[in-house]
Image (tube, rainbow, N blue to C red):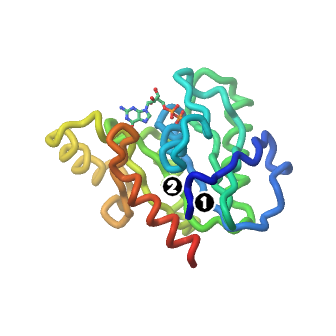
């Protein structure tokens, strides 16, 4: 794939607004502030394709990016504390509505901050992906912030914190060092060529 050619399609605030499911899709999910926008920008060699913000949690939309025969789907970052209950419900409605839809979702990149134990919401998402047999890859973000010892410690801890961690394909990722970028692209290329 020519990653430089991805184009922003649109942002949708309601599940019913999504474009017709005429392409295969790869989705990105994660806690707000996990580094999802930064990862999408790295993947597509762009500064501002996905908006990177230091104020987390404002965008409660599903954002679509088109490239070739694919849509890349940026799900709203969940778990932001400072929003109302009804707004939280709207977000989880969007995420669940999308994941449980009949759309041709080939893979979910599930992002988790490598520095910390996963949140309750992260575990709920991972459980949901496992239960629904949705293919997913765990992307462990901000890997550059850990030294070798800390990294080994977190990987060991994840074995206890994340269900089936050792059976899940996981990729340490850093938008600072580019660690993991090529591996993500290879996975996407395989799906595109399928
Ligand atoms: P999003 O809410 O998941 O879209 O998160 P953002 O992409 O906006 O990133 C949140 C914050 O984490 C920003 O300040 C980013 O600069 C920072 N960040 C994202 N990815 C990385 C990374 O790989 N390494 C480091 N050190 N910081 C990162």
The residue located at (50%, 50%) in the rendering is 43
- Asked whether, in this view, residue 59 is left or right of residue 81, the answer is right
Image quadrant where one finds the C terminus: bottom right
State yes or no: discs 1 and 2 in contact (Cβ < 8 Å): yes
Where 82 falls versus 104 (above or below)?
A: above
- Left or right of residue 44: residue 24: right
Closer-to-camera residue (185/27): 185
Quarter containing ligand 1? top left
Q: Decide if residue 118 is on the left or right side of residue 192.
A: left
Q: Residues within 10 Å of mark 2 (few under 14, many from 20)?
A: many
| x and y percentages locating residue 176 in the rendered image | 36, 37
Is 155 positioned to the left or the right of 171 in the image?
left
Say which residue label 1 marks: 26
Q: Secondary structure at mark 2?
A: strand
Residue in front for this viewpoint, 128 or 151: 151
Residue name at image x 69 percent, y 60 percent: 100
């Amino acid at each position: 794939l020519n990653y430089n050619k991805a184009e922003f399609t649109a942002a949708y605030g309601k599940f019913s607004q999504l474009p017709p499911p005429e392409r295969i899709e790869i989705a990105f999910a994660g806690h707000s502030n996990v580094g999802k926008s930064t990862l999408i920008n790295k993947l597509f060699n762009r500064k501002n394709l996905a908006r990177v913000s230091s104020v987390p949690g404002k965008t409660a939309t599903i954002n679509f990016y088109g490239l070739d025969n694919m849509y890349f789907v940026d799900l709203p970052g969940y778990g932001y504390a400072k929003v109302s209950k009804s707004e939280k419900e709207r977000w989880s409605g969007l995420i669940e509505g999308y994941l449980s839809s009949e759309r041709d979702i080939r893979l979910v990149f599930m992002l988790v901050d490598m520095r910390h134990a996963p949140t309750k919401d992260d575990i709920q998402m991972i459980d949901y992906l496992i239960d629904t047999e949705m293919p997913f890859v765990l992307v462990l973000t901000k890997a550059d912030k850990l030294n070798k010892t800390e990294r080994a410690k977190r990987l060991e801890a994840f074995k206890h914190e994340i269900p089936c961690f050792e059976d899940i394909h996981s990729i340490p990722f850093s938008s600072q060092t580019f660690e993991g970028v090529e591996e993500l692209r290879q996975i996407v290329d395989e799906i595109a060529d399928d």
